[in-house]
Image (tube, grey):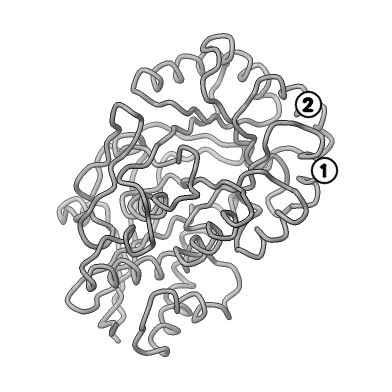
């Protein structure tokens, strides 16, 4: 595949409502789109890095720098690309910066699939025509407010509920949901807000029969998570701790988690996602696809990878209306009666750009000719 040019676009969209985690409250999303122009097609990749380096080391500003000054020149120097899986090795000299890598690699995967005339999910070996979506709910002011919010989402048809927690905004919130809704499929996400000193809290919530506890301890830890998993019955799911298939190998060998969250952006792209999926499948560790307040392009890539057979649990792939007033890709992602979203069957990611809205939310761009 001969790349003609790559265009980077700076984008900004306001969230419909603020989204609060243990580390920050977001009211808008700054992100970048990488357009890969090749073979008469345009492939789209999403850079999901947020504005603050509180989830991982990247921000939307640092990711732009890495894409512009390192990754795109590396692709240019590499010449023609026979297959998108080569990009992982091309980018290997750059340490981490995985959101930036995922954006460029994602655009190349999309362009390649379009040139081949096949859907991206088919190219990856996907086995589903729809994927189950859950809902992720930010930290609320009170347990009663959380109950009201969850009630609305259950009425919309969601079957899996994930709530963000942090110390002081945890036990009473989980208790309120169990009292209000019984045995709904419920999980919690701590975004690294706790330490092993909180082990009694985790033992205390064991009877709530949660689906999983996502990333309770430090963002770069797998040792203490092993100790926590040994002390509780509730499955521990690793998120921030997993940036590569090598991280997964170590975590599984240690027994640090029973479930792995895969975010395409966090692990550096679709190729690494597939490697992690395959390794977990071989070791009987289920995976699911997490989200990063993804806009249209990122969501499209998430849908594609979630069709792989070992993506077991409901994913953070909400409909277009969940976070945004408008979406710049068509068709809109919608939830069906089974709490699932349809997998598109057009070539590539399967969605089309709405040019008017795409330009509306773009506030800068740079073109790199090959």
**Crowding near pointer 2: few (<14 within 10 Å), some, many (20+)?**
some
- Please name whichever residue, 340 or 105, is drawn nearer the observer in this view of the structure: 340
- Residue 19 horizontal/vertical position (percent): 47, 35
Which residue: 62% across, 20% down?
Answer: 174
| Figure check: 34 above or below 284 | below
> Image quarter for residue 213?
top right
Q: Earlier in the sequence, mark 2 or mark 1?
A: 2
Asked if labels 1 and 2 touch by Cβ distance under 8 angstroms, the answer is no
Is 198 left, or right, of 163 in this rendering? Answer: right
Which residue: 30% across, 46% down?
Answer: 129
Is 331 left, or right, of 109 in this rendering? Answer: left
Which residue: 17% across, 76% down?
Answer: 40
Give the SS element for disc 1.
helix
Give the SS element for disc 2.
helix
- Please name whichever residue, 148 or 180, is drawn nearer the observer in this view of the structure: 180
Looking at the rendered structure, which numbered label has been put on residue 361? Answer: none
Is 16 left, or right, of 360 in this rendering? Answer: right
- Residue 7 horizontal/vertical position (percent): 29, 72
Count of marks overlaid on the render: 2
Which residue: 28% across, 68% down?
Answer: 113
- Please name whichever residue, 64 or 173, is drawn nearer the observer in this view of the structure: 173
> Image quarter for residue 79?
bottom left
Q: Quadrant of the C terminus?
A: bottom left
- The residue carrying mark 1 is 227
Q: Quadrant of the N terminus?
A: bottom left
Distance between the Cα atoms at labels 2 and 1? Answer: 12 Å
- The residue carrying mark 2 is 203
**Crowding near pointer 1: few (<14 within 10 Å), some, many (20+)?**
some
Judged from this view, the residue extending furthest toward the top is 179
- Residue 244 horizontal/vertical position (percent): 60, 63
- Residue 217 horizontal/vertical position (percent): 72, 43
């Amino acid at each position: 595949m001969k790349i003609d040019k790559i265009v980077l676009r700076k984008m900004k969209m306001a969230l419909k409502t603020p989204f609060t985690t243990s580390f920050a409250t977001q009211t808008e999303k700054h992100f970048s789109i990488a357009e890969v122009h090749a073979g008469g097609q345009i492939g789209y990749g999403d850079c999901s890095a947020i504005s603050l380096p509180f989830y991982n080391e990247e921000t939307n500003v640092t990711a732009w720098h890495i894409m512009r000054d390192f990754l795109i020149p590396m692709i240019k120097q590499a010449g023609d690309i026979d297959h998108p899986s080569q990009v992982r090795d091309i980018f290997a000299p750059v340490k981490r910066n995985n959101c930036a890598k995922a954006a460029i690699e994602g655009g190349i995967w999309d362009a390649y699939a379009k040139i081949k005339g096949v859907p991206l999910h088919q190219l990856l070996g996907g086995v589903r025509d729809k994927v189950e979506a859950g809902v992720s709910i930010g930290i609320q002011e009170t347990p009663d407010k959380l109950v009201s919010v969850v009630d609305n989402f259950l009425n919309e048809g969601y079957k899996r509920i994930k709530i963000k927690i942090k110390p002081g905004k945890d036990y009473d919130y989980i208790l309120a949901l169990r009292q209000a809704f019984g045995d709904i499929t419920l999980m919690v996400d701590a975004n690294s807000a706790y330490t092993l000193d909180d082990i009694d809290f985790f033992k205390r919530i064991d009877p709530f029969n949660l689906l999983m506890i996502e990333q309770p301890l430090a963002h770069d830890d797998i040792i203490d998570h092993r100790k926590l998993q040994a002390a509780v019955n509730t499955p521990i799911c690793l998120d921030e701790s997993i940036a590569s298939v090598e991280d997964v190998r170590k975590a599984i060998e240690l027994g640090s988690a029973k479930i792995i969250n895969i975010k395409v952006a966090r692990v550096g792209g679709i190729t690494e996602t597939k490697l992690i999926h395959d390794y977990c499948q071989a070791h009987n560790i289920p995976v699911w696809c997490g989200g990063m307040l993804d806009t249209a392009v990122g969501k499209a890539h998430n849908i594609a990878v979630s069709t792989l057979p070992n993506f077991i649990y409901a994913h953070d792939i909400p409909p277009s209306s969940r976070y945004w007033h408008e979406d710049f890709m068509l068709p809109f992602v919608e939830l069906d009666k089974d709490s699932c979203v349809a997998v598109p069957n057009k070539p590539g990611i399967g969605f089309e750009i709405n040019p008017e809205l795409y330009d509306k939310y773009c506030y800068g761009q740079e073109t790199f000719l090959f």
